[in-house]
Amino acid sequence: MELIGVRVELPSHQPIVLLRETASPNRVLPIFIGPPEATAIALALDGVETPRPMTHDLIKTLLDNLGASVDKIVVSDLVDSTFYAVLHLTAGGSALEISSRPSDAIALAVRVDAPIYAEEAVLDQAGQHQIDADQSEDSEAVVDEFRQFLDSVNPDDFAS
């Protein structure tokens, strides 16, 4: 899967992350996520370093210091409109699979440059045929609106 980016769905103003199949039929998998996770993904995509590490930066640092690696993430299931993901890690020579929210898995994958996959059953259930980018002036408006949100948000707003 290719991470297209994070968008805001109108009229609800709910952030979604968009993944696209890299092979035919190039379906797009939209996953609704929370604003903090959308910010975490967008900041990583833009290469923004925050003054203090965000949660996903901390996880990356922990994995690096423990000698563990993220081999891939997989959007593994869709149950009652809720997506599930699995982190595939290698630590101490052992393969590990850790359950995760897709948004957290994607935020981490962006930081460690890990490949993103989706199970075929998930794509069959929720994958949408790609919309031609030229069709959508609304798409540009949505991106602009999300960028305005990102410009107004401060990483410290998400500190606990």
Image: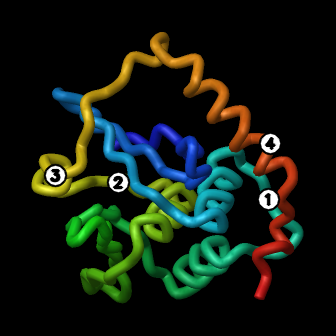
Of the two numbered discs 1 and 3 in the rendering, the one whose residue sits closer to the viewer: 3
Label total for image:
4
Q: CA distance from mark 3 to mark 4?
A: 32 Å
Q: Secondary structure at mark 3?
A: helix
Q: Secondary structure at mark 4?
A: helix
List x then y, in percent, for residue 137.
Answer: 58, 17
Residue under the point 72% across and 33% down: 144
Q: Count neighbours of disc 4 (C-alpha within 10 A) and say few if under 14, some if 14 to 19, many if 20 or more.
A: few
Q: CA distance from mark 3 to mark 2?
A: 18 Å
**Placement of the N terminus among the 4 image quadrants:** top left
The disc placed on residue 148 is 4
The disc placed on residue 116 is 2
Using residue 57 as the reference point, say whether residue 67 is left or right of it.
left
Of the two numbered discs 4 and 1 in the rendering, the one whose residue sits closer to the viewer: 4
Q: CA distance from mark 1 to mark 3?
A: 36 Å
Q: Earlier in the sequence, mark 4 or mark 1?
A: 1
The disc placed on residue 125 is 3
Which amino acid type corresponds to the residue marked 3 in the rendered image?
Answer: Gln
Q: Earlier in the sequence, mark 2 or mark 4?
A: 2
The disc placed on residue 49 is 1
Q: Earlier in the sequence, mark 1 or mark 3?
A: 1
List x then y, in percent, for residue 111.
Answer: 57, 60
Q: CA distance from mark 4 to mark 1?
A: 18 Å
Quick check: 158 above or below 5?
Answer: below
Q: CA distance from mark 2 to mark 4?
A: 27 Å
**Placement of the C terminus among the 4 image quadrants:** bottom right
Which amino acid type corresponds to the residue marked 4 in the rendered image?
Answer: Gln
Q: Earlier in the sequence, mark 3 or mark 4?
A: 3
Residue under the point 43% across and 72% down: 69
Residues at badges 3 and 2 in contact (C-beta under 8 Å)?
A: no
Residue 49's image quarter?
Answer: bottom right
Which amino acid type corresponds to the residue marked 1 in the rendered image?
Answer: Glu
